[in-house]
């Protein structure tokens, strides 16, 4: 299957961080790009994300690490302009999950060894000292990584897309075939919507609840999250407040914050930073991570003949892998222009 080598009309379905990043990469490569999204960027799951650049709940691990390293490089460069891009470089601790954070589904070491390449790639990453870890945690890492203010970053991506000639259209896409009738290539970044749109029953939500509080002076991030835990601990200082988390509940569809869960989230954060116990609550939020057994990043032909590049199923690592996945989308489009056929997956 080939597409014309001239000005290619691209339709990107989905306006979260995956869709916008893919759209920027394509537009800056010279394509005519239109993002179609039911929701404004600020209303997507991406806007609820804590924004730490670190692989979390995403497979396959080997590809996820490659994508994450690429995104780390891009976000670190964007962190030189934090007010414009929403990205900052912040030091923090990734602690081995304590017994209370592991949950029934935790398996010791699940996924940890697979991230060895990530540990090797992060500049300055080192083992945490005993005095840098909370009680009950035997090991962890200290690192300076990108921490992204997601609402600000999504606005930046939209501005960057517009500057490259792309557009954003607010409407619901009822089928990929419909999108393909109005575009040379469709890029499917519909996240959780892919469950019905593709349809792909492997796509399911992993519910995440967070509490945002006034910052009592916390400058470092902190995370303790078991690989299969339904409850995690993270403290992420953002310009608008401290994001406290969280939960990771498989197949939970509710977007309503649970007051009891919120209380437990604050209590876990306060065990690490006692000053959080009295911090004023600014907001409660719930997002549904678009999980899948493995990210789907592949090309197929839609009814009607248009090629579709699927890019969905990123779980809790959307911002962490967005630029690496966007590179693969761009390579897929270039391959199509060179005449190779679609690749299923």
Image: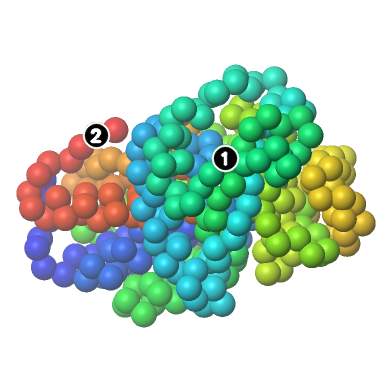
Q: Which residue is tagged 2?
A: 344
Task: From the top left corner, tell me how far across and down residue 124 is, in percent.
Answer: 49, 52
Residue in the image at 55% along x and 55% along y: 144
Q: Residue furthest right?
A: 278
Give the image quarter of residue 296: top left
Give the image quarter of residue 89: bottom right
Q: Which residue is tagged 1?
A: 127
Which quadrant of the figure contains the C terminus?
A: top left
Task: From the top left corner, tell me how far across and down residue 131 is, in percent.
Answer: 73, 42
Nearer-the-camera pick, 308 or 99: 99
Give the structural element (helix, strand or loop) at label 2.
loop
Task: From the top left corner, tell me how far across and down residue 25 is, in percent.
Answer: 31, 63
Residue in the image at 63% along x and 22% along y: 106
Residue in the image at 79% along x and 45% along y: 272
Q: Answer yes or no: do the residues labelled 2 and 1 have beta carbons within 8 Å?
A: no
**Residue 153 drawn above or below residue 103:** below
Is 302 left or right of 243, judged from the image as shown?
left
Residue in the image at 63% along x and 52% along y: 92
**Residue 6 drawn above or below residue 108:** below
Of tags 2 and 1, the one toward the viewer is 1
């Amino acid at each position: 299957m080939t597409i014309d080598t001239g000005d290619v009309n691209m339709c990107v379905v989905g306006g979260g961080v995956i869709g916008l990043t893919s759209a920027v990469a394509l537009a800056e490569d010279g394509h005519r790009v239109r993002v179609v999204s039911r929701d404004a960027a600020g209303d997507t799951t991406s806007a609820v994300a804590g924004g730490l650049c670190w692989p979390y709940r995403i497979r396959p691990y080997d590809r996820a690490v490659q994508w994450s390293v690429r995104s780390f490089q891009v976000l670190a460069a964007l962190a030189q302009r934090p007010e414009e891009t929403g990205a900052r470089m912040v030091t923090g601790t990734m602690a081995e999950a304590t017994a209370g954070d592991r949950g029934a589904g935790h398996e010791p070491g699940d996924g940890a060894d697979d991230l060895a390449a990530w540990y090797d790639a992060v500049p300055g990453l080192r083992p945490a000292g005993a005095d840098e870890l909370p009680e009950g945690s035997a090991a962890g890492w200290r690192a300076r990584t990108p921490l992204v203010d997601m609402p600000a970053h999504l606005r930046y991506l939209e501005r960057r897309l517009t500057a490259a000639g792309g557009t954003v259209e607010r409407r619901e896409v009822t089928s990929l075939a419909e999108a393909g009738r109005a575009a040379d290539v469709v890029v499917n970044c519909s996240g959780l919507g892919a469950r019905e749109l593709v349809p792909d029953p492997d796509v399911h939500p992993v519910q995440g609840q967070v509490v945002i509080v006034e910052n009592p002076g916390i400058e470092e991030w902190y995370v303790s999250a078991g690989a299969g835990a339904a409850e995690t601990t993270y403290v992420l200082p953002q310009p608008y407040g401290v994001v406290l988390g969280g939960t990771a509940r498989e197949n939970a569809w509710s977007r309503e914050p649970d007051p009891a869960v919120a209380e437990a989230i604050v209590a876990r954060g306060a065990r690490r930073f006692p000053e959080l116990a009295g911090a004023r609550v600014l907001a409660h939020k719930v997002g549904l991570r678009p999980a899948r057994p493995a990210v789907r990043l592949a090309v197929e032909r839609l009814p009607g003949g248009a090629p579709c590049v699927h890019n969905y199923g990123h779980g809790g690592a959307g911002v962490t892998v967005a630029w690496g996945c966007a590179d693969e989308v761009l390579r897929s489009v270039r391959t199509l222009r060179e005449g190779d056929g679609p690749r299923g997956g």
